[in-house]
């Protein structure tokens, strides 16, 4: 029987406590073992979360359509929109990034969330989210199942400007090299197309905003868009994105892996998630002021 989200979260908390002890004891073998178990538990938690979200979506789809007439008033029944803010913003960002599959800007995260989910996500509210997450991680370590963290530049391993990522992704996936912006764009396109396919297969028509988002991706990928078709073909977008990604994948992977190896050997846990301090910050810390 699959573990529940609550059980997995308890296991994650237990493993993170064990990891702190192993790191402090400098037990490399035990640290490696716990990290493997932690990655497996995080993957199981991600799967359980997606399963729960899909079940919620199916339940929502089973409700009467918005055009159904009210038996009491005779007026068309409107689909109620949840009150703004009922879902924590960090969870909204987590859902959007999980769908996109690669580091993304606040604007794209907001557009993606609003295209597939019922609530709005105000991009301006993301400005302080990463800093809040870093403070939480610094104070509590791995107390949460995931953190909204930073993408890292491949050369200096500092936070990549304007890009958010998930702590459950390996460092390689969060590195931004010279070829990574385009590679990640293609990953975003594939994630969007696959989500539309999942909705269609389940009998839930994708929202118009989701099709508009996919069209934006398809228009800039060679061979992905047929101007004669009313909407982009998700399968065609996926195939075209994979074909272009293959051209640069080997070089991009090598750059990411080399940078990730440096990050693992040079950075602390918090720095691997939120980046090394930029030189400007280091100078400020050293002098107390910066002219």
Image: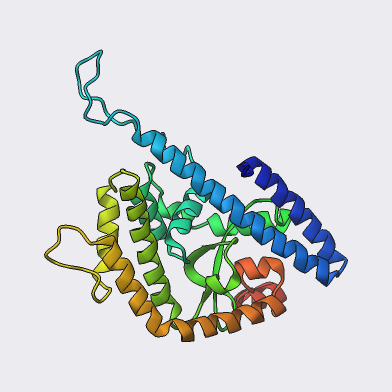
Q: 206 or 239: nearer the eye?
A: 239
Q: Residue 27 location, x and y as percent?
A: 85, 69
- Of the 4 image quadrants, the one containing the N terminus is top right
Query: What's the coloring here?
Result: rainbow
Figure quadrant of residue 141: bottom right
Q: Residue furthest front?
A: 1
Figure quadrant of the C terminus: bottom right
The residue sitting at the right extreme is 25
Farthest-out residue, left: 228
- Residue plotted at (63% across, 59% down): 134
- What percent of the width, then of the height, locates residue 164? 50, 63
Viewed as shown, does residue 126 lie left or right of 10?
A: left
In the picture, measured across the screen, residue 35 lies left or right of residue 259, that is right
Residue at x 51%, y 53% (from the top left corner)? 94
Q: Could one spot residue 186 in this view of the protein? A: yes
Q: Residue at x 11, y 64 (%)?
A: 228
The image shows residue 278 at horizontal and vertical percentages of 60, 76
Up/down of 247 relative to 185, above or below? below
The x, y position of residue 57, in whole percent, is: 40, 40
Q: In this image, 278 relative to 34: left or right?
A: left
Seen in the picture, residue 82 relative to 163 is either above or below; the reply is above
Which image quadrant is residue 169 in? bottom right
Residue farthest to the top, as pictured:
72
Number of numbered discs: 0
- Look at 47% across and 49% down and name the residue there: 92
Can residue 156 be seen by looking at this rendering? no
């Amino acid at each position: 029987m699959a573990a529940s989200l609550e059980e997995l979260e308890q296991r994650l908390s237990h493993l993170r406590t064990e990891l702190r002890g192993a790191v402090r004891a400098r037990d490399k073998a035990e640290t490696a073992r716990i990290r493997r178990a932690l990655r497996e538990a995080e993957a199981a938690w991600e799967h359980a979360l997606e399963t729960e979200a899909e079940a919620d979506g199916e339940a929502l789809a089973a409700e009467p359509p918005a055009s159904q007439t009210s038996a009491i008033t005779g007026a068309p029944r409107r689909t109620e929109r949840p009150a703004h803010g009922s879902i924590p913003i960090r969870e909204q960002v987590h859902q959007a990034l999980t769908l996109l599959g690669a580091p993304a800007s606040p604007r794209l995260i907001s557009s993606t969330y609003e295209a597939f989910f019922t609530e709005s996500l105000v991009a301006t509210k993301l400005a302080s989210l990463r800093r809040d997450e870093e403070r939480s991680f610094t104070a509590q370590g791995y107390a949460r199942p995931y953190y909204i963290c930073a993408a890292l530049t491949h050369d200096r391993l500092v936070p990549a400007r304007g890009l958010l990522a998930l702590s459950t992704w390996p460092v390689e996936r969060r590195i931004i090299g010279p070829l990574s912006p385009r590679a990640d764009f293609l990953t975003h396109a594939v994630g969007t197309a696959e989500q539309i396919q999942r909705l269609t297969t389940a009998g839930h028509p994708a929202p118009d905003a989701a099709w508009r988002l996919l069209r934006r991706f398809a228009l800039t990928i060679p061979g992905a868009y047929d101007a004669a078709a009313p909407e982009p073909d998700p399968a065609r977008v996926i195939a075209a994105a994979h074909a272009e990604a293959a051209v640069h994948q080997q070089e991009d992977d090598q750059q990411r892996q080399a940078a990730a190896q440096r990050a693992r050997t040079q950075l602390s846990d918090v720095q691997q998630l939120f980046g090394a301090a930029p030189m400007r910050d280091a100078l400020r810390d050293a002098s107390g002021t910066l002219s």
